[in-house]
Image (cartoon, helix red, strand yellow):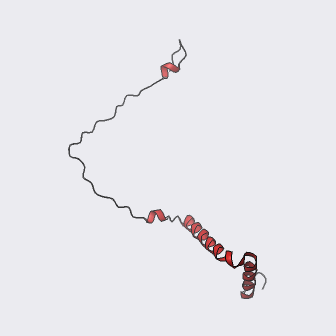
Amino acid sequence: MPGFVGFPELIFLGLVVLLIFGPKRLPEMGKSLGKGMREFKDSISGDNKDDDKVEVVTATTAPENVVVVPASTEVLNHGAAESAPEGKVSH
C-alpha cells in the first residue's frame, strides 16, 4: 500500500536517525522535542502554569478615621503661554 509506514519502515528510520545523530545526542533531541511539543500544546490550549499558582491574600482591616479628599478638577496648562509666539494668542 503506497504511503503506509509500517513497522519495518519505522525500524529502518530509527536506525538511520541513530546513525546520523549518534547515541549521545538522541536522548537530548527527544527531550527538546518533548519540551517543544508541550509548550506548543500549552500555547494552543491557552493553559498557563502561572494561572495554577495560588495567591495567598491576607485580610487587613481598613483604618476607621479616613478622610477622602477629592482630587482637584483644575486643569493646569503649563508652558502654553511660553510656546505661543509673541503678539499671538494660542487657542
Q: Position of residue 77 (x, y in %)?
A: 44, 25
- Most foreground residue, 57 or 41: 57
Decide: is 10 above or below 38: below
Tag count in the figure? Answer: 0
8, above or below 18, in the image:
below
Residue at image position (38%, 61%) is 55
Furthest toward the left, the residue is: 64
52 over 70 or under it: above or below: below
In the rendering, at what x and y percent does residue 46 appear? 52, 64
Q: Position of residue 4 (x, y in %)?
A: 74, 83
Residue at point 48% right, 19% down? Answer: 81
Position of the N terminus, as image quadrant, is: bottom right
- Left of 1 or right of it: where is 84? left
Q: Position of residue 31 (x, y in %)?
A: 61, 73
At 60% from the left edge and 70% from the top edge, which residue is drawn?
37
Going by the picture, which residue comes out furthest to the right?
2
Q: Residue furthest top?
A: 87
Extreme-bottom residue of the structure: 8
* Residue 74 occupies quadrant: top left
Report whether 21 appears left or right of 39.
right
Displayed quadrant of residue 3? bottom right
Seen from the viewer's position, the closer of residues 18 and 9 is 18
Q: Nearer the viewer, residue 71 or 35?
A: 35
Q: Which residue sits at x=23%, y=47%?
A: 63
